[in-house]
């Protein structure tokens, strides 16, 4: 081949690689673009601009929903839906307000205890789904009521306390980077990436694509599903801890749990994860969560009644689901989804 032909071939292959990357990551890229526009508009409406305090506050609020959205993403990848993430979030918040205090040793034990409770709640969900052979949406709806009941027992009235030194560290910014964003990066690096590259992580994608085909291929379905729900509970408990650090208290309010559950589903969809399973990433869900949080902030800066936020959230969710469904309507062969 001539040098010109070789150069042309390389250029063609490079363009194909770029096109494939954009196609594969279009959900994440769209979520990033939407967030950039919305947050830019939010900053433009601020009289003092985007100060470090404003960014830190926005990051702290967005990180809570981002963690719950990440918790929702992993079961969704298997083709399930976890309606208990909001209540595990609430339960661990109430538990943290009881046991995450005292000296550094007792605080550390309390943090570990909260994370273990979230992990056990997720394992319980997974075990019932797998061995009870029940629909995840039914199982997690039932367990969410149980988890809320325990939260009410722990905190019949809002209150409690938390280690103030640790809470102060978790709500600050260092080198202009909010700690809450550092937590998100840490979760991605030390939980999501190892999980995605593991055998059971790849199995989760296979199950979501086609559980029957995954079973026929020898994919470990039961362990993969249980691990997915276990990680969901763990991530929800991390969010519960963060909420305790931000508020210095716990509150068993059913509306909080329901709002986070609904918004987590919206964030997952906006982030490009298919509710049919098999396609998605927690990275997209993170930006989807920040989009959802920025909706509320924009309502405030544009003097729109915040009471209307559920209306706008519902519209965004409906629009996101509809856009995702349009692709399915154009596809005759389901295999085309994964090309």
Image (spheres, rainbow, N blue to C red):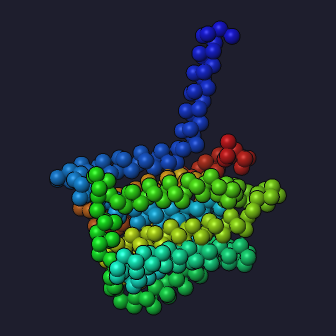
- Residue extending farthest right: 216
Quarter of the image with the N terminus in it: top right
Left or right: 3 in relation to 169: right
Q: Is residue 337 above or below residue 90?
A: above
Left or right: 47 in relation to 172: left
Pinpoint residue 56: horizontal percent, then vertical percent. Answer: 29, 59
Q: Nearer the viewer, residue 300 or 162?
A: 162
Q: Is residue 319 above or below residue 308?
A: above
| Quadrant assignment, res 66 | bottom left
Pinpoint residue 186: horizontal percent, then vertical percent. Answer: 45, 57
- Residue extending farthest top: 2
Quarter of the image with the C terminus in it: top right
| Quadrant assignment, res 12 | top right
Identify which residue is drawn at 47% across, 46% down: 30
Identify which residue is drawn at 58% across, 55% down: 194
Left or right: 70 in relation to 99: right
Identify which residue is drawn at 25% across, 58% down: 54
Report if residue 204 is visible in the image.
yes
């Amino acid at each position: 081949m001539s040098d010109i032909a070789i150069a042309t071939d390389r250029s063609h292959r490079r363009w194909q690689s770029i096109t494939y990357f954009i196609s594969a990551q279009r959900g994440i890229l769209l979520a990033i673009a939407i967030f950039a526009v919305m947050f830019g508009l939010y900053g433009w409406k601020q009289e003092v601009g985007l100060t470090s305090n404003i960014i830190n506050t926005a990051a702290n609020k967005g990180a809570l929903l981002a963690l719950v959205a990440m918790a929702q993403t992993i079961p969704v990848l298997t083709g399930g839906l976890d309606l208990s993430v909001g209540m595990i979030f609430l339960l661990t918040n109430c538990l943290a307000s009881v046991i995450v205090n005292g000296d550094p040793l007792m605080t550390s034990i309390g943090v570990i205890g909260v994370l273990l409770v979230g992990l056990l709640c997720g394992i319980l969900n997974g075990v019932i789904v797998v061995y009870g052979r029940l629909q995840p949406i039914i199982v997690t709806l039932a367990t969410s009521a149980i988890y809320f009941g325990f939260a009410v027992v722990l905190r019949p009235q809002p209150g409690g306390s938390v280690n103030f030194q640790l809470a102060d560290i978790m709500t600050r910014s260092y080198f202009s980077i909010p700690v809450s964003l550092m937590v998100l990066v840490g979760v991605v690096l030390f939980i999501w990436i190892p999980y995605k590259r593991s055998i059971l992580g790849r199995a989760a994608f296979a199950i979501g694509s086609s559980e029957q085909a995954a079973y026929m291929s020898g994919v470990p379905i039961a362990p993969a599903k249980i691990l997915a729900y276990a990680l969901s509970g763990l991530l929800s408990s991390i969010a519960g801890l963060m909420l305790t650090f931000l508020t210095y208290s716990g509150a068993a309010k059913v509306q909080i749990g329901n709002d986070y559950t609904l918004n987590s589903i919206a964030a997952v969809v906006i982030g490009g994860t298919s509710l049919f399973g098999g396609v998605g990433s927690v990275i997209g869900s993170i930006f989807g969560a920040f989009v959802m949080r920025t909706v509320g902030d924009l309502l405030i800066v544009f003097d729109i009644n915040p009471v209307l936020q559920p209306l706008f959230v519902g519209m965004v969710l409906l629009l996101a689901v509809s856009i995702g469904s349009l692709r399915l309507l154009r596809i005759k062969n389901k295999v085309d989804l994964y090309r």
